[in-house]
Structure formats: structure tokens, C-alpha cells
DNA sequence: TTAGGGTTAG
């Protein structure tokens, strides 16, 4: 950047007085013209104006103009040399630092202001200082500024109070913000918007919507910022009804014309799964920016319509809008969710051509895409090419290893991350804890538990829930339950309940699991699909047939849920083990969607225990179609034939296997099969394999719920 | 001179 002395040669101010100079500076300040300010500054030096009697006033004006024009470096230099600094100039300097994101500098200057004793901070100073505290998440500093504002009589100023709301919300202190809000004599739309947005960002979308309703009821006029604050909460909660109401009101109040508001609307409809409405709003937009396009593309990706996403991306470029890093990250996540490696590689090529490979968003999306396509070598290669100083790429690679079932590798990387002094965050722990659960190693579980306590993460509900899962899988139910009890009652969420219920279930304590389930319902929490999987699984592990069936019915009639494949698997398993094979088969036939191999496998398992050839054949036939290469199914069917003495049929199954080119498993002869898989062992091994599959699903569902 | 707001990745 050229300084004032460089600008000298271009000087066009021949004869100019100090007052003319002041007027010009005011003009440059309003037009934010840094170059002109530098030129005029140079002129004041050469013309001797800065040596005159008015020099202090002129230097002060120059400093203010520089501050306005974002020439903060020059402003600071002049500011420091001034013999007297007006309160306005102090405020202006603090403001510029705060607004430019130089929060530490803003606070340092604020402290200097206090130390100089020249002026006391006023109703203009506090908002800038509080913004800086909020941006830095410096709660202690924010609180002492708050105290000072109260002590100096500015605590009831609307601007100061609104800034306090924002500062506390930024620092995650919802209750403190609420206390101030409750005590406000005069609330403006900004106060309401800050609360709505603050609750949403602090993980309380329901409260955000509540505040919005309260705002409307109290007669406060919503503005565009209200809309962009409340719509994400509707999208997050998939509350299409509320979203539509807001859309309607927006049209009535005419506060939805801004492009940012239209973008939020598209996003809300997309998140609520209403692609038609999202597209309608998108199509009706008079003006679209890259965010509009990216949001609409993201809506298609979210709703599993990758084809439309790609088509729209093409159209976007035809219309001359270039994708940005976020657009590419969205497209990469589409490739990841489809496991479309070829497409993902094309996108990678494009990233390189656009020279966007150094952007952390894109890097992370690439790592994730390769991991979801099961290409851990490429995923790792991209990871190694990043600077590895930020947390996010570490999270992506760790979760990639966990996703591919490589728990040990994930844990090694997690240890390396800590050695490299990269700070893990909530997402790192949510990714890594299931890896410890997979290991089911009590010593390792204790190690990670210690780490969580040392690093302060043990107070988070999600982390504790992860630990409950780990201790459960290690067979240490006592520790799991103690952890569960350590969660404050108000913070107990559906996921932590599901985890402890699953813990009891997987160790055959069905009664305790049901008891916990009832307790949970009594505490006012509504069970979700995952909770039902846990409790139904517990029933099938303990053989609680009637209870299981009761809960299954309750899920459908009382909670109006549509059972998923894993719920059917639990019930089929439950009935089949109890010998109620016909009922199990009837249930499969009544399923509203195509039964998956797990469901048929549960029936076949029951047929093995109860030596039922007829239903065994039906389920095996379906399984041979669905998973022709799964040797286990052939083994089980031949086991049934063997048990009833149908050696010829058993031989046929063996021949089928050979025709399929499947390798004979060691000992796959009927005589040997009997030895290897004698009945009790068989049941155990089946329990193991089915419960593993279910457990994985449970973990995945819980992660999705998180 | 002052306060609040949108899209993405784990």
C-alpha cells in the first residue's frame, strides 16, 4: 500500500487552508476514500499545514478520516502523537478495531483509554467493546465491562443492552442474556432478533421460535434480520408449517425482498424437505447470487436428488455464476453420499483447476468424499497435503477411518493430533468415541475418559453419551449407569437415554432396559426411532416376547411412527427365537416395504433353532437372491436340512455354493458343520453377528440424531 | 459515532 509520502508526487493541492483541508477530509471520510486522504495528508506535510497552530485539530481530523477509510495503521500513528484526544476520537478508534475484527486491539485501546483517564467510556464506547469481547468469547472481560457500564449509569441504554445480549449469546450464556432481556424497559427489533438468533446458535431452536412468536404477539414489527434469524430454526426443526406462516407474514409485511431473506427461505424449504416450494422461491427471485444457487443445489443434495443438483450447477455456470468453495463442498458431499468416486474425482480435478485446493472447506470435503467412497488412501493423501494445523481436516480424516470400521487407525490419528498440539473440539470427540466403543477395551476406555476429564469435555452431554456407549460395550454397565446418572436431569436428552437402554439391552438385561424406557417416557421425553430400536433389541436379547410386541404396537399406534427395517428385524428375531415362526413370517409379508437381508436372516436364524424346514427354505431362497455371496446363509440352511436328516437337500445347498464359485469355508461338510456349529454355539455366534450389525446401525443412527 | 442477520465442510 502506498503511504502518504509516496502519494506526494501526485499531490494536486497547491494552496489550501487548514479549514479547507478539514472540509475535504470530511468529504473523504464520507466517501471512504483512502487514496485521497493519503494525498491530502502528504500535502499537509509539505505545505507546512501540520506545523501551524491548528495542527493538533488537523491531525485529529486526519486520524478520524483514516479511521473511517480503514487506514487504521495511519490513524493509530497520528492518534498516538496527539496531545489531546476527544472522546469521539477514542470511540472511533475502538470502533474501527472492533468492526474490523481486530478485537484484541480494540480491547487494548479500551484499557489504554481507562488508564489515560482522559475520558470515561460512554454509551457509544460500550457497544464496540462488548462486540470485541463477544467475538473473542472473553466472557470474564465482557462481564467486567458490563459491571462498568452499570456502575457508570449506561446499563439501561438500549444500545448497550442490545450489545450485552449479543455478547452473552456469543459466549453461550443464554441465561445471562435472558435476564437482561427480561429487565429491558425498551426493546427494539434488534433485541428480539439477537435473542432469536442467539438461542438458535446456542442449540435451542425451539426457544428461538418461541421468542419469534412472543415478538409478533407483543406487536414488534419483524424486519429482514428477524426473517434470516428465525428461518434457520424452522429449517433445523423441519417445521414446515411455521416456515410457511413466516413466509406469508413476510409477504404481508413486505420485509422479504432482500436477496439474503430469499436465500434463507430457499434454505428453510430445502431443509424441511419441500423441494417444490424451495424451487418456486428460487425461480421467483429477481436477482440471484452464488449463495442462492449454492443453497438450492444444497437443498437437492440434502434431499438425495444429486441429479438435479448437478443439473442446477450446470445451469448456474451457463448463467455466468462461478461456483465458490462452498458450492464445491456441497457437490463433493453429494458425491460422498452417493459413494460416487468417479464423480468425486472429477470434482477434485475441478478444485485443482480453480486453485481452490488450499481452502479448508474444500480440503475437508475432499477428505470426507474419499472416505465415504471407501478410498482411505486417497483421503489420507489429501489430508497429508493440508497444513494440518486446523481441527476440521483432522475431524474429517478421523471420522473417515471410523466410518470405514478402522477404529485403531482412527485412535492412532487422534493421538497424533494431540501430539501435534491441534485442539480437538466437540466434533472430534463425537467422531472418535465410537472408535473406542468398537475396540471394547476397558483400559483404553478409562484412558479416553481421563483425557475428557482433563480437557474439560466430560461436562458435555454428547461426550458423556459417547462414554456411556463405550463402557456399555466394554461390559461395564455400572460405570455406564453412573455416567448416565451424572448428567443433570434437565440435560438428559433422547440420545443419552437411548444409549443407556441399549447398554442394558446388549447384555441381556431386558427388564432394566424396559424400566428405563418407561422412566424416560414418564420424564416427558418422546422416544424416537433409535430409542425404539434399543428397547426392542433389548427385548429380543432377553426373550421378552410380549413386552417387545407391546412396545412395537405402541410405537405405531401411540407415537405414530413408521417402523423401519431394523425395528422389523428386532420383532422378527424376537418371534423367531420364541418359536413363533409363522407369526414372524406373517409380519414380514405385511411389511410395507421390501424386507432386507437382516429381516430374512432373523427368520432363518429362528428356523435353525427350531428346525423349521418350510420357512427356512422361504427365507433362504430370498437370502440367496439378495446376498448370493454370503456363505453364512448356505451354511445355516444346510444346517436345518442336516438337523432333520435331509442329507440330499443339504448336498444340493453345498452344490449351489460350489456353482456360485464360493470358497468352501473350512470344515464345510455336513458332518463337520455339525461339529463346528453345534446348536448352542450357533446361537451365540448368530447373536454376535446380528447384534453387531444392529449396534453399528444404532451408533450410526445416534450419530445422525446428534 | 453505537447494537442484531443468510449458504458449506466434521
Image (cartoon, helix red, strand yellow):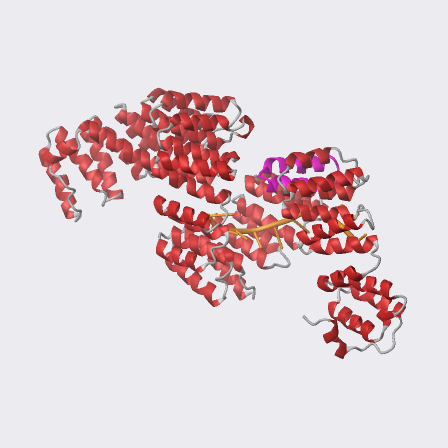
Magenta-highlighted residues: A193-221
Q: For residue A209, say whether it is visible.
A: no
Q: Quadrant of residue B1?
A: bottom right
Asked if residue A624 is positioned above or below residue A352 in the image, the reply reads: above
Query: Would you say A90 lies left or right of A601 here?
Result: right
Q: Could you say which is closer to the camera, residue A463 or residue A671?
A: A463
Q: For residue A141, say whether it is visible.
A: yes
Q: How many marks?
A: 0
Residue drawn at (64%, 37%) of the image: A173
Q: What is the x, y in percent for residue A33?
A: 75, 67
Q: In what quadrant of the picture does the N terminus of chain A appear? A: bottom right
Q: Quadrant of residue A441?
A: top left
Residue drawn at (52%, 48%) of the image: A275
Residue drawn at (39%, 58%) of the image: A381
Q: What is the x, y in percent for residue A64?
A: 79, 60
Query: Would you say A639 lies left or right of A412 here?
Result: left
Q: Quadrant of residue A155?
A: top right
Q: What is the x, y in percent for residue A627?
A: 26, 43
Asked if residue B3 is positioned above or below residue A695 in the image, the reply reads: below
Q: Could you say which is closer to the camera, residue A226 or residue A490?
A: A490
**Magenta segment, principal secondary structure?**
helix
Q: Is residue A596 magenta?
A: no
Q: What is the x, y in percent for residue A506?
A: 35, 29
Residue drawn at (50%, 40%) of the image: A455
Asked if residue A519 is positioned above or below residue A99 in the image, the reply reads: above
Q: Is residue A207 magenta?
A: yes
Q: Could you say which is closer to the camera, residue A272 or residue A366?
A: A366
Query: Would you say A310 lies left or right of A539 here?
Result: right
Amino acid at each position: 500500500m502506498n503511504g502518504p509520502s509516496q502519494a506526494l508526487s501526485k499531490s494536486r493541492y497547491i494552496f489550501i487552508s487548514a479549514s479547507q483541508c478539514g472540509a475535504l477530509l470530511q468529504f473523504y471520510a464520507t466517501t471512504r476514500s483512502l487514496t485521497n486522504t493519503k494525498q491530502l495528508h502528504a500535502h499537509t506535510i509539505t505545505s507546512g499545514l501540520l506545523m501551524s497552530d491548528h495542527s493538533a485539530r488537523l491531525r485529529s481530523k486526519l486520524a478520524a478520516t483514516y479511521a473511517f477509510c480503514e487506514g487504521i495503521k495511519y490513524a493509530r500513528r497520528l492518534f498516538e502523537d496527539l496531545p489531546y484526544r476527544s472522546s469521539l476520537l477514542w470511540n472511533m478508534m475502538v470502533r474501527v478495531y472492533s468492526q474490523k475484527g481486530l478485537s484484541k486491539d480494540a480491547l487494548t485501546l479500551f484499557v489504554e483509554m481507562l488508564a489515560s483517564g482522559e475520558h470515561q467510556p460512554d454509551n457509544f464506547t460500550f457497544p464496540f467493546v462488548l462486540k470485541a469481547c463477544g467475538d473473542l468469547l472473553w466472557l470474564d472481560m465482557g462481564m467486567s465491562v458490563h459491571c462498568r457500564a452499570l456502575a457508570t449509569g449506561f446499563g439501561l441504554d438500549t444500545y448497550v443492552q442490545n450489545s450485552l445480549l449479543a455478547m452473552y449469546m456469543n459466549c453461550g450464556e443464554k441465561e445471562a442474556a435472558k435476564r437482561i432481556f427480561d429487565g429491558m424497559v425498551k426493546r427494539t427489533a434488534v433485541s428480539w432478533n439477537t435473542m432469536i438468533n442467539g438461542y438458535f446458535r446456542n442449540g435451542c431452536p425451539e426457544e428461538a421460535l418461541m421468542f419469534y412468536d412472543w415478538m409478533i404477539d407483543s406487536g414488534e414489527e419483524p424486519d429482514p434480520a428477524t426473517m434470516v434469524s428465525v428461518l434457520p430454526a424452522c429449517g433445523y426443526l423441519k417445521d414446515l408449517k411455521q416456515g410457511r406462516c413466516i413466509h406469508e407474514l413476510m409477504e404481508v409485511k413486505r420485509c422479504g425482498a432482500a436477496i439474503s431473506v430469499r436465500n434463507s427461505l430457499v434454505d428453510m424449504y430445502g431443509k424441511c424437505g419441500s423441494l417444490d416450494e424451495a424451487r418456486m422461491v428460487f425461480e421467483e427471485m429477481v436477482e440471484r447470487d452464488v449463495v442462492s444457487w449454492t443453497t438450492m443445489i444444497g437443498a437437492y443434495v440434502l434431499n438425495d436428488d444429486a441429479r438435479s443438483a448437478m443439473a442446477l450447477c450446470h445451469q448456474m455456470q451457463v448463467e455466468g455464476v462461478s461456483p465458490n468453495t462452498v458450492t464445491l463442498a456441497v457437490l463433493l458431499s453429494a458425491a460422498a453420499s452417493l459413494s460416487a468416486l468417479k464423480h468425486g474425482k472429477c470434482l477434485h480435478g475441478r478444485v485443482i483447476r480453480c486453485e481452490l485446493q488450499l481452502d479448508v472447506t474444500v480440503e475437508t470435503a475432499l477428505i470426507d468424499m474419499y472416505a465415504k467412497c471407501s478410498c482411505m488412501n486417497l483421503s489420507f493423501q489429501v489430508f497429508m497435503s493440508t497444513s494440518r494445523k486446523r481441527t476440521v481436516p483432522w475431524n474429517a480424516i478421523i471420522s473417515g477411518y471410523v466410518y470405514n470400521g478402522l477404529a485403531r487407525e482412527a485412535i492412532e490419528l487422534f493421538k497424533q493430533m494431540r501430539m501435534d498440539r491441534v485442539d480437538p473440539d466437540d466434533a472430534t470427540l463425537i467422531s472418535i468415541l465410537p472408535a473406542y466403543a468398537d475396540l471394547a477395551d476397558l483400559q483404553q476406555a478409562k484412558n479416553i475418559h481421563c483425557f475428557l476429564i482433563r480437557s474439560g469435555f466430560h461436562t458435555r452431554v454428547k461426550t458423556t453419551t459417547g462414554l456411556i456407549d463405550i463402557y456399555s460395550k466394554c461390559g461395564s454397565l455400572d460405570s455406564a449407569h453412573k455416567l448416565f446418572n451424572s448428567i443433570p436431569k434437565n440435560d438428559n436428552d433422547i440420545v443419552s437415554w437411548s444409549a443407556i437402554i441399549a447398554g442394558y439391552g446388549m447384555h441381556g438385561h431386558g427388564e432394566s432396559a424396559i424400566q428405563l424406557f418407561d422412566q424416560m417416557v414418564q420424564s416427558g421425553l418422546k422416544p424416537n426411532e433409535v430409542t425404539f430400536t434399543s428397547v426392542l433389541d433389548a427385548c429380543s436379547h432377553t426373550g421378552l416376547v410380549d413386552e417387545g410386541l407391546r412396545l412395537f404396537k405402541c410405537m405405531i399406534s401411540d407415537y405414530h411412527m413408521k417402523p423401519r427395517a431394523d425395528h422389523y428385524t428386532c420383532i422378527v428375531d424376537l418371534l423367531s427365537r420364541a418359536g413363533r415362526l409363522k407369526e414372524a413370517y406373517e409380519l414380514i409379508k405385511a411389511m410395507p416395504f421390501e424386507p432386507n437381508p437382516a429381516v430374512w436372516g432373523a427368520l432363518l436364524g429362528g428356523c435353525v433353532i427350531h428346525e423349521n424346514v418350510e420357512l427356512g427354505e422361504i427365507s433362504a431362497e430370498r437370502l440367496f437372491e439378495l446376498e448370493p455371496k454370503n456363505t453364512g446363509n448356505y451354511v445355516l440352511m444346510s444346517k436345518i436340512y442336516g438337523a432333520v436328516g435331509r442329507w440330499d437337500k443339504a448336498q444340493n445347498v453345498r452344490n449351489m455354493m460350489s456353482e456360485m464359485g464360493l470358497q468352501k469355508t473350512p470344515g464345510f461338510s455336513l458332518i463337520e458343520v455339525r461339529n463346528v456349529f453345534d446348536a448352542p454355539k450357533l446361537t451365540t455366534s448368530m447373536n454376535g453377528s446380528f447384534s453387531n450389525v444392529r449396534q453399528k446401525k444404532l451408533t450410526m443412527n445416534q450419530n445422525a440424531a446428534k
